[in-house]
Amino acid sequence: MEIAVYLDDDRNIIGVNNTNNLAAEMQANEKGWTLIQNSDPAFSIDNIYEWTVRESDSKLVHKSTGFTPDEETKKSLTDLTNGQLKGQLMDEQVQQAVTAVTKQAIQDKLTSQMAITALTKQVANLTIKLDKANGVDPAPEAPTDVTSTSTKDGATIAAK
C-alpha cells in the first residue's frame, strides 16, 4: 500500500495520509509530502515518532537504526551467523591450541626423560672413573662360598 508522509525539518513524521493509494499519490504532490510506495506493514500511526523516511530511497525506516524492519531482521541474522562462525573458529582455534600444547608437553616430557637418562649414564661413568682413580674397584665381589641349609624352622643361608 502507498502512503504519504509529511516530514518536519528534522525529518520527523508529523503527518500521514494512509486512506488509499490514490489519496496518497495526490497528497504527495503537495509541498513537504513524500510518497512511500510499499509502506512497511510494521508502520503504525501510533508510533510515528519512531520512524522517519530515508532520503536515498524514500523508505520508512526506524530512527534508531536507519533500517527497515526487514533490513533489521536480515542484519540480525547476518550478525548471528557471523557470531556463530566466529564462535566455531574460536572453538577450532582453542582445540588446535590445546592439541599443540599437549603435543609440546609430551615432547618436553620425552626430552626430559632422555636428558635424565643421559645424565644418569654420565654420573655412573664418572663415578666409575672416580672410584678407579681413588683405587677402589667398583665391581663388588661375589661371595666365594655360599651354603644353604634347610631346617624345620626355615631355611638358613650363609655366605663367606
Image (cartoon, rainbow, N blue to C red):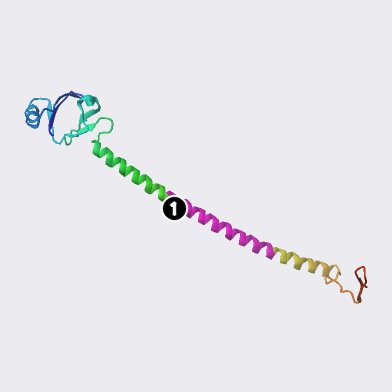
- Total numbered labels: 1
In x, y percent, where is residue 9? 18, 23
Res. 50 image quadrant: top left
119 versus 71 height, above or below: below
- Check the image and report above or below for 140 versus 106: below
- Tell me the quarter of the image containing the N terminus: top left
Q: What residue is shown at x 28% (from left), y 33% (from top)?
A: 65
Asked which quadrant contains residue 69, the reply is top left
Residue 22's spot in the image, x, y percent?
Answer: 6, 31
Check disc 1: other Cα within 10 Å, few if <14, some if 14-19, many if 20+. few
x 25%, y 39%: residue: 71
Q: Nearer the viewer, residue 87 or 2?
A: 2
Question: Which residue, as the protein is rendered here, is positioned at the far front?
Answer: 152
Q: Which residues are magenta?
A: 90-118
Q: Position of residue 149 (x, y in %)?
A: 92, 74
Give the residue at mark 1.
92
What type is the residue that disc 1 sits on?
Glu
Residue 91 on the magenta span: yes
Residue 56 is a magenta residue: no
**What SS does tag 1 mark?**
helix
Q: Which secondary structure dominates the residues rendered in magenta? A: helix
Give left or right: position of 102 versus 127.
left
Q: Is residue 125 left or right of residue 95?
A: right
Q: Position of residue 81 (x, y in %)?
A: 34, 46
Q: Quadrant of the C terminus?
A: bottom right
Seen from this angle, which residue lies furthest bottom? 144
What residue lies at 23% left-to-right and 29% top-to-bottom? 51
